[in-house]
């Protein structure tokens, strides 16, 4: 079983860049790491961190390598990279988790929603955390009719994912992992 998490970088970071990306970001990113760790017990997890400075970086990449190899790319190029990664992941993943701010969600997911739904694997699990204004624009019917489980969390403030949604997500993943 494979899962992909798409999330924005945190402004709170570790003192040292001598660590993987997934350990470099701190603060509210710790919730993402808790989710990552729980999913890693059941699935092969791929973490994609969206950064206007570095683009889309993998959770296992060394932060020192990321800093050495890239110049600031800006939001448009980051959105292009993220869109391509989202489309690639949708076609192969069993669990798709997208936790983005309004602007980034609109620049990425909104622009390719129909393609994402078309390429999504049957019976996959989708968890989307975004502002209510973003989520209400999406049509989940095609995913659900294809046997997909769709969980949404309407972001309030800076929380990326609510406790209840997290619990439902982990239960759904556990159920699929045992089948």
Image (cartoon, grey):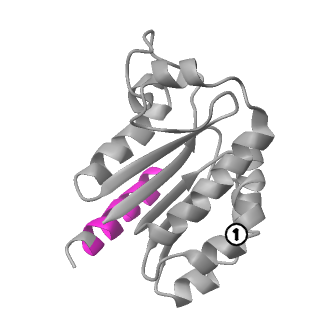
Residue indicated by mark 1? 113
Is the N terminus in the top left, top right, bottom left or bottom right quadrant?
Answer: bottom left
Q: Residue furthest front?
A: 69
Residue at 60% of width from left, 23% of height from top? 11
Residue at 73% of width from left, 31% of height from top? 73
Is the C terminus in the top left, top right, bottom left or bottom right quadrant?
Answer: bottom left
> Start and end of the magenta stretch?
162-176
What x and y, as percent, mark residue 146? 51, 88
What x and y, as percent, mark residue 83? 67, 55
In this view of the protein, which residue sits in the foreground, 92 or 22?
Answer: 92
Q: Is residue 119 above or below residue 126?
A: below
Q: Is residue 131 above or below residue 173?
A: above
Please tell me in which quadrant of the rendered image residue 115 appears. bottom right
What x and y, as percent, mark residue 142? 61, 85
Horizontal arrangement in the rendering, residue 133 relative to residue 41 (left or right)? right
In this view of the protein, which residue sits in the foreground, 21 or 150?
Answer: 21
Please tell me in which quadrant of the rendered image residue 15 appears. top left
Residue at 69% of width from left, 60% of height from top? 109
Q: Main secondary structure of the magenta part?
A: helix
Q: Is residue 38 above or below residue 97?
A: above
Label 1 crowd (10 A; few <14 / some 14-19 / many >=20): some
Horizontal arrangement in the rendering, residue 59 relative to residue 152 (left or right)? left
What x and y, as percent, mark residue 88? 55, 62
Q: Secondary structure at mark 1?
A: helix
């Amino acid at each position: 079983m494979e899962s992909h998490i798409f999330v924005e970088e945190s402004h709170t970071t570790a003192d040292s860049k001598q660590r993987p990306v997934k350990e470099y970001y701190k603060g509210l990113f710790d919730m993402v790491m808790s989710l990552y760790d729980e999913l890693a017990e059941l699935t092969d997890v791929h973490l994609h961190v969206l950064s206007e400075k570095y683009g889309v970086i993998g959770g296992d990449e060394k932060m020192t390598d990321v800093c050495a190899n890239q110049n600031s790319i800006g939001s448009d190029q980051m959105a292009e990279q993220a869109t391509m990664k989202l489309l690639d992941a949708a076609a192969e993943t069993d669990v798709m988790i997208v936790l983005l701010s309004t602007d980034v969600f609109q620049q990425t997911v909104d622009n390719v929603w129909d393609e994402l739904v078309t390429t999504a694997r049957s019976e996959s699990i989708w968890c989307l955390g975004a502002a209510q204004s973003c989520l209400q624009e999406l049509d989940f019917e095609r995913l659900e009719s294809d046997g997909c489980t769709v969980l949404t969390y309407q972001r309030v403030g800076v929380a990326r994912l609510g406790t209840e949604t997290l619990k439902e997500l982990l239960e759904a993943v556990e159920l699929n992992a045992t089948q």
